[in-house]
Image: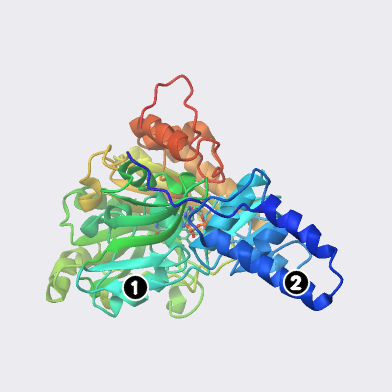
Amino acid sequence: MQLKKIQVASKVGCQIRSRQSEIRNQSCPIIMGLMRLVLHLNFVSQIFTKKNTRTMEAMTLDQLKATLRGELIQPGDAKYADACKVYNGMIHRKPTYIAYCADVSDVRAAVNFGRENGLLIAIRGGGHNGGGLGICDDGLVIDLSRIKYTYVDPVTKTVRAGGGCVWGDVDHSTHGFGMATPSGIIGTTGVGGLTLGGGIGHLSRKCGLSIDNLLEAQVVLADGSVVTASEKENSDLFWAIRGGGGNFGIVTSFLFRLHPIDTVYAGPMFWDLEKAPEIMKWYRDFIKTAPDDLNGFFAFLVVPAGPPFPEHLHMRNVCGIVWCYTGPLENGEKTFADIRTKFGTPILDWVGPIPHPALQSMFDALYVPGLQWYWRADFVKELSDEAIAQHMKYGGNIPTMFSTMHLYPVNGKAGQPKPGDTAWHNRDAVWAQVIVGVDPDPANAEKITKWCKDYYNALHPYGHGGGAYVNFMMDEGQDRIKASYGENYDRLVAIKAKYDPKNIFRVNQNIKPVAEGSKASA
Ligand SMILES: Cc1cc2nc3c(=O)[nH]c(=O)nc-3n(C[C@H](O)[C@H](O)[C@H](O)COP(=O)(O)OP(=O)(O)OC[C@H]3O[C@@H](n4cnc5c(N)ncnc54)[C@H](O)[C@@H]3O)c2cc1C
């Protein structure tokens, strides 16, 4: 496949530096000032030319600073402590440089600076990753949060989103046109990380995963060049970024397909904990045959101790399903009539007409940034009685108000593509299961971690394929990553070797460019 590259013109070291020393010999400060300005403009202009005028010398920090339209933060800067924060309060990493990129050219300059200076590079989109993959120690963080724009085209029914958008940005802009694209269940999650890992949410059964609705991406590669990835251009790269995470480059713009989804009939429904085995047994069969219009993820949770939840339910360990019906609104009542009576009246029933962005942001206020999070996950195909018994043991004993277990359906439309159609492999799984120990207090970190690990260890034998949804994993080793990609792994290795042979982008669920004993081909 022909790689369409825009030549990088950001390495101008030698030429500029030799002319800088000439300037230092000048005595008139006005002339010196003018010369500096000319050199700066000369340097910046070379960044934007297509001609590669770079020498072998590494880009200096001053050159990076002169190039960035965004901002470079370093240790000692007043903003440094805040710039080091990511969503998971358990993660404390101290990078040497944090480059807030304002546009694609900034990203290219940052990539070149990091690569030429041998720095570890982390890419930060929304900063939500459970394992803290948006930040690193000692290296360079390329932060995309300022590349935030959306453009809805009502004619082609698409939305283009900047690489630093969070889903709330996209949901807000598309809702204005009565449309939506599949995302996650929290509005503050990054479009970048969520999409590149797969993207599961309320619309998965109706419209597929986020990657199934991705039409095109603009990608800055490890060598600083910029390419388009789509079915028509660099289709191998397009295949790989649909599930392969941030391994292949930095996506600065995403183009998604939109669906006519506006107000949905949706919300949470809770039942007493003792009803959980009966409900789970019904749900495991129901969700396999339910119409694609109906999504519902099962949860064990503790009812939050505050409004709008009724006081008598506060801090009760319950089970629930968060529904999202995208069929005709007038059919909503009918769709839930049987479910509403089947297990007695639910102890909480907030299922009803709701604007799609309101559903998407329903849990944002509960899950604010900075909480302690510990994650474990699996894919699940069968929910056996034995597995349900283990769920009752751990899901029925949640250690803190924020901790929870979710079973997200990935069947329906999300299950229709073949395992080899995109890098996301597990098209035959029925659920992506996630167990999260969550609490604001670092003193409880050990407690939530232990509960999460114990729960996972008890359920993992009932999982499917040994792997998990990569976006729900922490640092769990290479075998888990391989298992998650199954037979797609070797092809991912070959594509990685083509686009990032030196593994410049490795702060992720890493696909190494060298296959161990396998003959990978792109
Ligand atoms: C509260 C919460 C709720 C969640 N809910 C869901 C859900 O409903 N559905 C779901 O599918 N997932 C969900 N997730 C998981 C989420 O998909 C991952 O945490 C994901 O990594 C977050 O993306 P981010 O951009 O915010 O993360 P970051 O921490 O910024 O980045 C994570 C990884 O993605 C890569 N990356 C990010 N942006 C780019 C980019 N533009 N180009 C290249 N690489 C990039 C980085 O290299 C890094 O490895 C949730 C996470 C949290 C914390």
Give the image location of residue 131, x and y in percent: 56, 50
Residue bearing mark 1: 151
Q: Which dot marks residue 266?
A: none
Screen quadrant of the N terminus = top left
Q: Is residue 463 above or below residue 369?
A: above
Residue bearing mark 2: 78
User: Which residue shows up at 18% across the image and 62% down it?
Assistant: 293
Give the image location of residue 334, x and y in percent: 13, 70
Given residues 414 and 161, the one toward you in this image is 161
Give the image location of residue 189, x and y in percent: 46, 63
Q: Is residue 489 above or below residue 447?
A: above
Left or right: 413 in relation to 271: left
Where on the picture, by quarter, is residue 2? top left
Give the image location of residue 456, x and y in percent: 48, 42
Kindly report the distance in space between the C-alpha atoms of the residues bearing marks 2 and 1: 34 Å
What amino acid is at disc 2? Ala
